[in-house]
Image (spheres, rainbow, N blue to C red):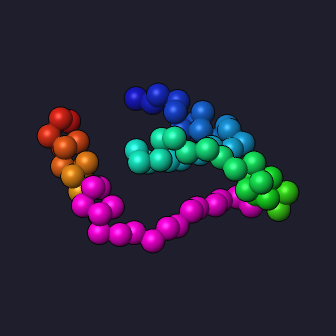
């Protein structure tokens, strides 16, 4: 059975994929302009992680497993 979600996403020129801790993410128009102007197909932000983030992620994962 197919839902058409993949076909819909592939039909879009740009998509923003985020995880649950970045729901309020705002796209910087300067970065988007750079990607479009230079025909960059994929861009990923990589930031250093800290122990609190790892603990929080584990707790969220644990809670999500309880309620699934």
What secondary structure is the magenta-colored segment mainly? Answer: loop
Residue 19 at x, y = what percent?
44, 48
Q: Is residue 33 magenta?
A: no
> Viewed as shown, does residue 46 lie left or right of 10?
left
Residue 58 at x, y = what percent?
23, 56
Q: Is residue 63 visible from the viewing direction of this image?
A: yes
| Residue at 65% from the left image edge and 59% from the top image edge | 42
Range covered by the magenta-colored residues = 39-57
Q: Quadrant of residue 16?
A: top right
Q: Is residue 36 visible from the viewing direction of this image?
A: no
Residue 66 at x, y = what percent?
14, 40
Is residue 53 depicted above or below 15 in this figure?
Answer: below
Q: Which quarter of the rendered picture does the C terminus lie within?
A: top left
> Viewed as shown, does residue 19 lie left or right of 11?
left
Task: Report the number of discs.
Answer: 0
Residue placed furthest toward the front: 52
Q: Is residue 49 magenta?
A: yes
Q: Which quarter of the rendered picture does the N terminus lie within?
A: top left
| Residue at 56% from the left image edge and 62% from the top image edge | 45
Q: Quadrant of residue 40?
A: bottom right
| Residue at 65% from the left image edge and 46% from the top image edge | 27
Residue placed furthest toward the right: 37
Is residue 24 depicted above or below 33 in this figure?
Answer: above
| Residue at 35% from the left image edge and 69% from the top image edge | 50
> Viewed as shown, does residue 34 lie left or right of 44?
right
Is residue 55 depicted above or below 25 in this figure?
Answer: below
């Amino acid at each position: 059975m197919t839902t058409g979600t993949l076909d819909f996403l592939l039909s879009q020129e740009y998509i923003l994929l985020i995880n649950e801790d970045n729901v309020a993410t705002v796209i910087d128009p300067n970065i988007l302009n750079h990607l479009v102007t230079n025909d960059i197909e994929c861009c990923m932000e990589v930031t250093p992680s800290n122990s609190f983030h790892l603990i929080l992620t584990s707790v969220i994962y644990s809670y999500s497993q309880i309620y699934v």
